[in-house]
Amino acid sequence: MAALWITADEAQARLGVRLQTLYAYVSRGLITVRADETDPRRSLYAAEDITRLVQRRSRGRSQVASRALDHGDPVLSSSITTIHDGRPWYRGRDAIAWAETASLEETARLLWDCDEDPFIGLAPHPSTGVGGDARARAFSLLAYRAANDPATSGRSDKALRREAASIMIDLVDAMSGAARNGLIHERLAKTWRVDSSKADILRRCLVLAADHELNASTFATRVAASTGASLASCALAGLSTLSGPLHGGMTLQVAAFIAECRRTNDPRSTAALRLSQGLDVPGFGQLVYPAGDPRARAIAQALIYADDLREIAAAGESVTGVAPNLDFALVAATRTLGLPVDAAFTLFTVGRAVGWFAHAIEQRSSNRPIRPRASYVGLEPGYLDRQELVFEPAPAADAKVSPDPDDLDRPEPLAANNG
């Protein structure tokens, strides 16, 4: 079959490049060129080379997208949070330093980029969340509001911030199981009967959990927001993702690991046994912090963990070679304070909800859905249509068919009841 040659205009159109780029591909040996026999002043380009180059570029884009979705290159722009020099930064402010004194409400104002206080005048009211534990009540509350709250499309940022604040208050009351007054960390402290001297630890945990760039639950929140869904719907998408065992649900695994270490009274052997079984040691290591999670360090420095928890932290780090992360710090802090088993997940959810709303409001301004493309690895389109279908001829009516040995012991089927 003769090679197909195309003009420069056709080559540019197929590649989607300028003429200078086409010449660059030729100079690098990626595209073969020859003179047009009918017009020596004009060049023709090998269509096969161009097709191969287009396919290679397409594969390259797919690989970049794949890496981006797995702690790789950024997949969208945001001005809310970044990880820089091994630390999280909230709108240019060092989040670790910010957490020294800021409340979660002040953090919301910072991340939501607002001057006014959207929490002013929001009084507690009976919760619409139902369920036997904090997580169930959170799902119930957000599902109720998602079914009743208006979409974000066409609404002002000021109105959305006010709505976000009202959802935050409802969420705290639902997860704590009581409607109380005061700042969010004070509400939780009253519910858990934490004295005022220890309530500051709750504040610090909430602020440090508030946002962490494009983690899984935040990305899910932005996808929902990109469709114009209500803020409660966006938070419900975030909570659904957060609840997974590889995200916020990891706090339950950390709690189980700590309980096992306490049962055996040998945390080092307990951690080593998990590794020997091919299991991770929950609560240790963070991919974006090779030198250790600064949020976990900040919590550990602010609260002296119970003796056995310090021993477990040291043993886990010694066996795994990586430091405790935020999941471990939240569980260790709540265990040291004697809080309910689901308190760590509550702190994670309430704190991170502030970040979810910040991203939902920011995403709304793009006015287009997040719609990544898939890197297809299945059968070539049309492959099955090109295969010859082979049918075995049916036996003649009077032909004898050998019974299947597997059917010899089966009873005769009953006649259908047509009554």
Image: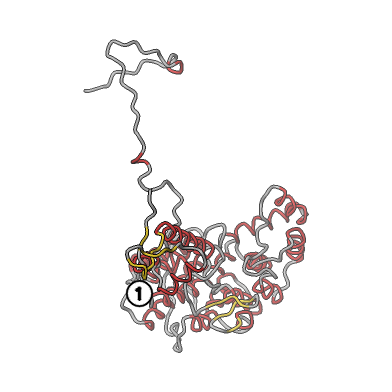
Q: Judge left or right: residue 13 versus residue 280.
A: left
Query: Dot 1 surroundings within 10 Å: few (below 14), some, or many (20 or more)?
Result: few
Quarter of the image where one finds residue 16: bottom left
- Amino acid, disc 1: Asn
Place of residue 106 in the rendered image (x, y in percent of width and height, measured from the top left): 52, 83
Q: Nearer the viewer, residue 387 or 49?
A: 49
Q: Is residue 171 above or below residue 256?
A: below
Judging from the image, the colouring scheme is secondary structure
Q: Nearer the viewer, residue 372 or 247?
A: 372
Name the residue: 52% across, 67% down. Answer: 28
Image quadrant where one finds the C terminus: top left
Q: Can see residue 155?
A: yes
Q: Judge left or right: residue 7 versus residue 138.
A: left
Quarter of the image where one finds residue 318: bottom right
Place of residue 364 in the rendered image (x, y in percent of width and height, measured from the top left): 38, 75
Place of residue 381 in the rendered image (x, y in percent of width and height, measured from the top left): 37, 48
Name the residue: 46% across, 81% down. Answer: 112
**Residue picked out by circle 1:** 367
Q: Can see residue 134?
A: no
